[in-house]
Amino acid sequence: TLFSYTTLFRSSGAVLGQGVLPLDAGSPPIHPLAIGSPALDAGPCDLAEDQRGAPRPADACDSGAYERQPVDLAIAIYLAGGVAVPGHPFSYTLAFANRSRDAIASAVVISHAIPIFLTDVHVEGAKPDGRVYPESADLWQMGDLAPSARGAITVAGVISADLAGEAVFTLTAAITPTAGTADANAANNLRRARVRINWQPTADAGGPYPTIVGAPLTLDGSGSHDRGGDI
């Protein structure tokens, strides 16, 4: 039972390698397991959650009321608009996080190639330690991400006016730990987003049209065109 797990922790903390009670502990308080504790992966998995409500795995659960949450890096791409127009501003954001409540993600790297259709590129965003990302880099060395740490990188620029016709580009971003840290959920380490480049149509009434005062005049719009081919 949950009560017996908690009792095990309190009676044998030195053996199990427990940390101190957190200052913001819930009710009742709980001891976190230290790295290297023999209680890690040493208990039964008859409960779906630990005392905090954190999930337990299907097998190799930690012994006691606390299930140490492994590193879980995630990244997402948010577009400032689904359609990009040549000659106009465009931006998007890479949002990243270490979703683990307990584990530090070591030497985290974010890889992302700035798209070739974007000119006058400006990259900004503060790391958790307050530093600023370098501009126009395809690789960001993030350092260590603490449990529950989050951040964002915003890429802004102007869609190249030299693009011919419509096109669809795919943005790709990946986040990985590079110092031997295992990621519990690699499925959210890679994200893609499609950007559609669309030229705005040009309206042209055509002409010149000869006419006389008081007579109806029809403009056929024959000079209108759309480089994207939608019209």
Image (cartoon, helix red, strand yellow):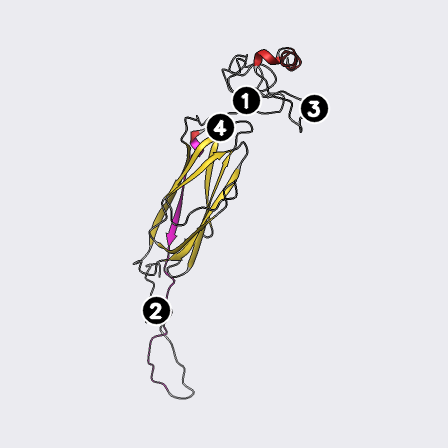
Residue holding disc 2: 224
Comes first in the chain, label 1 or label 2: 1
Q: Between 44 and 17, which is closer to the camera in this rendering?
A: 17
Residue holding disc 1: 68
Q: Residues within 10 Å of mark 3 (few under 14, many from 20)?
A: few
Residue 123, x across and y down, in percent? 43, 50
Query: Residue 27 bears which disc, if any?
Result: 3
Whether label 4 touches label 3, CB < 8 Å: no
Residue holding disc 4: 71
Q: Which residues are magenta?
A: 187-211
Between marks 4 and 1, how big is the CA–CA gap? 10 Å
Query: Residue 147 bears which disc, if any?
Result: none
Residue 73, x across and y down, in percent? 47, 33
Q: What amino acid is labelled 3 in the image?
A: Ser
Q: Could you tell whether 199 is left or right of 39 in the image?
A: left
Residue 163, x across and y down, in percent? 31, 58
Q: Residues within 10 Å of mark 2 (few under 14, many from 20)?
A: few
| Residue at screen point 65% across, 23% down | 21
82 shown above or below 207: above
Quadrant for residue 65, please give it. top right
